[in-house]
Image (cartoon, rainbow, N blue to C red):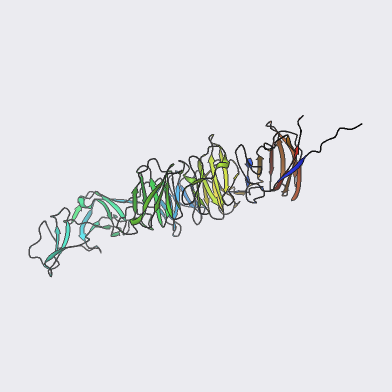
Amino acid sequence: MFLPQLKATDAEREMIGEFRGYNHNLRIRDNEFYDMANMSSNLYPVLSPRGRRARARRLTKPNGLFAHDRLCWVDGTGFYYGGEQKGTVADSPKQMAAMGAYVLIWPDKAYYNTHTGEFGQLGCKVTVQGGVTAALCRLDGTAYEGYTVSDTAPVAPENGALWVDTGGERQTLKQYAAASGLWISIPTAYTKITGTGLGAGFAEYDGVTLSGMEEETLNGDFILYGAGDDYVIVTAVISRAVSQSGPVTIERKIPDMDYITESENRLWGCSSQKHEIYACKLGDPKNWNCFMGISTDSYAMTVGSGGDFTGACTHLGYVLFFKEDVIHRIYGAKPANYQLTNVESRGVEKGSEKSLVIVNETLYYKSAQDVCAFQSALPASISYPLGQTAYHHATAGALGSKYYLSAKDADGAGVLLVYDGARGLWHKEDGIYALWFAGTGRDLYFINEADGWLYSVMGDAESYAGDGAALEGTVSWSAETGDIGLKSPDYQYISKIQLRMELDAGATVELALDGGDGQWETKFTASAARKRSFTAPIIPRRCDSMRLKIAGSGGCRIYSLTKTIEQGSEL
C-alpha cells in the first residue's frame, strides 16, 4: 500500500529594510505607504513618527507671521516683535519682508526698525493750509536777489548779473560772464518753498509730489534737494517770489503692490491692476519715485503678459514675479541694466503665494497642477506621490532640508505634508491647515487656522510663550501599506508577516490587516513599560491581496518588514 506523495511547499522570504514614505497612488512600492499620519523621515531608512510640537501662544485674530532676527506677527491690529507689541496696523492679512534692520509690513506700507525700535509709515503726506511762500534760491537755501525777468536779455549787464529767461518753452536762470560777453545757463536752479510744518517727515533726496501751488511750475513730481520742518527745496525756476493763502500738499507716495520681496537691498513689488513692477531706491524703502539718473534710483517697468500676479520671491540672485502660467525674471545690478525675461511655464497657483519657499538653494511652490521644484531653468514636478488629490491655497515653510506644505483639498479639509528634499521623500503628518509659516533657522513656527495657536515644530514652548504654552502630548501615528500581493502570480500567497521594531517606554502599537474586503482585523498589539525591541509575527488568512496598517502612540522605530511567500495550488 502506497500513501499519496505530498509536494513540499515552496516558500521564499522578502525583507524590506528601507521605508520610503508616502505615495497615494494605486500601485506603489512595497516600501511605500498609501496613507499615513504623523510619520517622518527623521530616522530614514527607519520608519518613525514625527517629534512632539509645542504650542507657544494663542492669537486672537492672526493676520500675519514672519521671522527676522526674532519672530514677529500681527494679531488683530497689533504688530508684535519678539513677543512685544511695537505698533498698530489695520485689521487685515499681512505680507512682511526684511530689508536690513527694517521689517516692512504690507498693505499698510508700515515699517519697524529692529535696531532703533522705531515704528512708522513709509509714506508721508503733509497739507499746509495757507501761508506758503516760494522763491528762487541756491542749493544751500539762500535766496537769489536782484535778478531780471524778461523774454529778452538785459542791456549792459554787470558781471555776475542774473536773468530769468522767459522767452523759451521753459524758464531758465542765466548768469552773465563779462569775460566772454555771454549769458551762461545755470545748470540746476532751485526754489525754496516755505510753510509751517511743510517739510516735517521728509528728507533730502526724497521723491515727492507737490500739488496746490498757484505757481503751476511747482506742481508735479520733484526730488528734494533740501528739507527742514518748515521748508523744502526743489529744482524749479520761477519768475518771481510768490505767496499764497490756499492749501498746499506734499506727498512721498508708496505704490500699491500685491506681492513684495527683497533683493540686493531693495524692496520689489508688483501690481496686477497696473501690470507694473517696482523697486524702491537702493537701501531706502521710503522712496519709490526718486529718478536722478544714478545707480541708486528707484525703478518701475510695465509687463506685457496677461492675467494677475500670483506671487513674488528672490532666488539665486534674481527677482521672480509669478503668474499662473508665466515666470518673470529680472536680471541686472542697477536700473540702467535691469532686464525682464518671461518664461512660459507653470507659475504659482492663485491663492498659493505663501507656498514659495527656498530649501537648500531649491525654490519650491504650489502651481495650479502640482508642487514644483525650481532651481535655475524650468520647474519640475515633485508631487506624483501625492496622488490625484487636488490641493489649493497652499502655505509652506522650511526646516533643514524639509519643505513643509499645508493645503486644503476640494472639500476644504486641511493637510500638512512634508517633503524631504535631501532624500526625495514625502511624509504626511496631520490635518492641520497652517495660515502662515516662519522659520528661524533652528525651528519652524506656524499658526493653526483651527485654534489660532502659534506652534513650534521642534517643540519649543519657551521662546515665545504666552498663557497656556505647553509641549504636545504623546503623538498618535499610523502607516497603511498599499495592496500587498498584487504582483504575486500562480497562486502565491503571503503566509506570514514579521515586523522588527523598537518602542519607547509608555508607547503602544497595533497591527491590523485588511484581506481585501475593507474590514480591518487587529492581529497584534503591544505596549512597553520600558524601552524595548521585539519582533511582531502576523499570520494572515489566505487571500489574494491585503493591506497592513501599523498604528500607535509614542516613540517607535520600525526597522524591517519581512514577508513569507508560499506557492499554493489550484483546488
Residue 158 picture location, percent across and down: 11, 67
Q: Is residue 549 above or below residue 208?
A: above
In this rendering, position of residue 355 left or right of residue 340 = right
Closest to the observer, 106 or 3: 3
* Farthest right residue in view: 1
* Farthest bottom residue in view: 179
Q: Residue at x 20, y 58 (%)?
A: 135
In this rendering, position of residue 478 left or right of residue 338 = right
Q: Is residue 106 visible?
A: no
Labels in figure, total: 0
Q: Is residue 416 above or below residue 338?
A: above
Residue 144 picture location, percent across and down: 18, 62
Q: Residue at x 59, y 50 (%)?
A: 423
* Farthest top residue in view: 571
* Farthest left residue in view: 155
Residue 205 picture location, percent across and down: 31, 58
Residue 191 picture location, percent across and down: 22, 58
Figure quadrant of the N terminus: top right
Q: Residue at x 9, y 61 (%)?
A: 154
Figure quadrant of the C terminus: top right
Closest to the observer, 157 or 322: 322
The image quarter in which residue 494 lies: top right
Q: Is residue 364 visible?
A: yes
Q: Is residue 354 above or below residue 1?
A: below
